[in-house]
Amino acid sequence: MAGLAQVKRRHRGLLVSFLVLVALPLAAMILYLWLVATDQYASTVGFTVRKQEGVGATDLMGGLAQFTGASASSEADILYEFIQSQEIVQAIDARVDLARLYAGPWPKDPVFSFRSGASIEDLVRHWQRMVKISYDQATGLIEVQALAFSAPAAQLVATEIIRESQNKINDMNASARADVMRHAEADLVASVARLKAAREALTRFRTRTQIVDPAADIQGRMGVLNNLQQQLAQALIEYDILQESAAPGDPRLAQGQRRIEVIRARIMDERQTFTGPSDAPGSLAGDYPTLIADYEGLTVDREFAEETYRAALAAVELARSDAARQSLYLAAYIRPTLPETSEFPRRFVLTGVAALILSMIWAIGALVYYSLRDRQ
């Protein structure tokens, strides 16, 4: 029969290493967590960013909604980063003195309390340890758990987070409204300048041509031409009748022929005013086709400028009406809670994690040691 196993030197070394690397650190940690570490209370608050529902005047116009900024989910992304930023830490610290609130029982609990007199960067790092954020991008829900060494202090921090988050939303609303007004007013200024230029161009055309409306003017000239043509037809008929009854050399024949020639010359002059050059007799400022084309182009420019001006004016009014309402707001689905029992530090969880990590380090070290020893 085999004898009892003998405790050898390597076994003692393994036991000593376990005591040094696992048992003693774990015992020190347990003593610190249960005897030194101060209880921490957690206040929970949950909120999301909502967009004002319903169809407003801006949505009816269909043109200004694009200036309202990002969607509610992207606003929640901004808030998620904002709550972890130095900006919110400085804002809350200015009101409630976070350094004093987180100092706690220093130096009794140096691990979980904040060291007084540290820099703002140290305070931000400690804030990120004491404020735990949970964010669901699919729903846009943000849940914040604020830790402190007393229940009222934890609730105060959670309330301040809600307050600063609402201020951030208000700032984003103000920025969006300013963008809407700036774009709308810039469009209005441009449309006013365009309308003014179109009207001035039309005035210069009328001054140069001395014609208020070429279409009305040509109708009048066409009436004169039609009248002359009727007179020419009447003169030709009278001349033909006179030729049949009058003797050769009758002065009335020469007079009738002269009348016909004068009417024909006048008709030619009238026609020349429609298509002749600008220096032609009776022409005011060029041929009528060119004048009408220029006038119609100027009229179209003026009408388009007027429509643009009316649209820009309506956009400014709608932007002002939208500025009176808040398009984004913070909706809290969990108000800052007042805890009754301390939940942190989670001593059993920390002890279990520490025991696992220390045991793994010790086991890996022992395996490495014996592997190297066996190779020798």
Image (cartoon, rainbow, N blue to C red):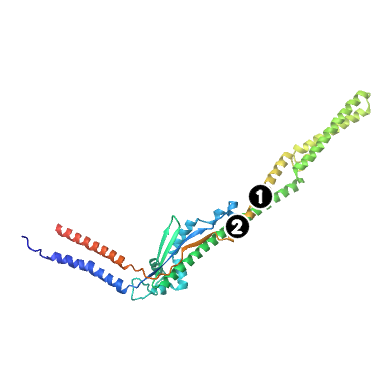
The image shows a total of numbered marks equal to 2
Do residues under tags 1 and 2 come within 8 Å of each other at their CB atoms? no
Looking at the rendered structure, the kind of residue marked 1 is Glu
Work out whether residue 356 or residue 267 is closer to the camera in this orientation and state it: 356
Image quarter in which the N terminus is found = bottom left
Vertical comparison of 359 with 240: above or below: below
Q: In 3D space, how far apart are the residues under numbered discs 1 and 2 (Cα atoms)?
A: 18 Å
Please, which residue is most extreme toward the left here?
1
Looking at the rendered structure, the kind of residue marked 2 is Ala
Work out whether residue 95 or residue 160 is closer to the camera in this orientation and state it: 160
Name the residue tied to disc 1: 307
Q: Label 2: few (<14), some or many (≥20) within 10 Å?
A: many
As helix, strand or loop, the secondary structure at mark 2 comes to: helix
Work out whether residue 231 or residue 76 is closer to the camera in this orientation and state it: 76
As helix, strand or loop, the secondary structure at mark 1 comes to: helix
Left or right of 358? Residue 342 is right
Name the residue tied to disc 2: 319
Q: Residue at x 58, y 60 (%)?
A: 323
Q: Residue at x 42, y 59 (%)?
A: 135
Vertical comparison of 171 with 221: above or below: below
Left or right of 358? Residue 279 is right
Q: Residue at x 66, y 52 (%)?
A: 310
Left or right of 195? Residue 178 is left
The answer, for residue 360, to whether it is visible in the render is yes
Q: Residue at x 90, y 26 (%)?
A: 241
